[in-house]
Amino acid sequence: MTQAEALARRLRRLALNRQGTEAQVWLEEGFLYLRQDAHAQFAQGVIPEGLLRFALLRGGVELFFQDGSRLRLLYRLGRLKKEIYFS
């Protein structure tokens, strides 16, 4: 099981702000707060093991892990969609 798959199983909810600069990824044991603007990225809270970086997308978040896997969380038609990619 990749690190992205392990996190996808523990994921509960995703909250985004309207400007697309902040996100909260709610997990079983707490939440991960992500902030990204033109100059910096900031992550705080329950940081998953192996998380290298993240990108805030229009309507979602993409998380990049050490093992080369990626987890993309998007809202489509009001439902949270989890997409796992391997490099």
Image (spheres, rainbow, N blue to C red):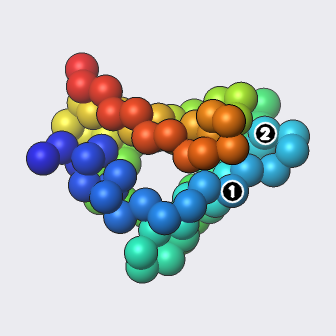
Residue matched to label 1: 15
In the rendered structure, the answer to whether residue 39 lies left or right of residue 73 reads: right
Element class at badge 1: strand
Q: Tell me which residue sits at (60%, 45%) in the image.
A: 79
Give percent across and percent down for residue 76: 63, 34
| Vertical placement of residue 20 versus 38, above or below | below
Give percent across and percent down for residue 40: 69, 40
Residue matched to label 2: 20
Mark closer to the chain start, 2 or 1: 1
> Disc 2 to disc 1, how far (Cα)?
10 Å
Q: Amino acid at mark 2?
A: Gly
In the rendered structure, the answer to whether residue 65 lies left or right of residue 37 reads: left
Q: Amino acid at mark 1?
A: Ala
| Vertical placement of residue 40 versus 31, above or below | above
Q: Tell me which residue sits at (44%, 41%) in the image.
A: 82
Asked whether 50 or 75 is in front, the reply is 75
Q: Residues within 10 Å of mark 1 (few under 14, many from 20)?
A: some
* Residue 14 appears in the picture as rendered: yes
Asked whether 47 or 78 is in front, the reply is 78
Give percent across and percent down for residue 25: 56, 59
Q: Nearer the viewer, mark 2 or mark 1?
A: 1
Q: Tell me which residue sits at (78%, 31%) in the image.
A: 38
* Residue 54 appears in the picture as rendered: no
Question: Looking at the image, how many numbered discs can be counted on the residues?
Answer: 2
Q: Tell me which residue sits at (27%, 33%) in the image.
A: 69
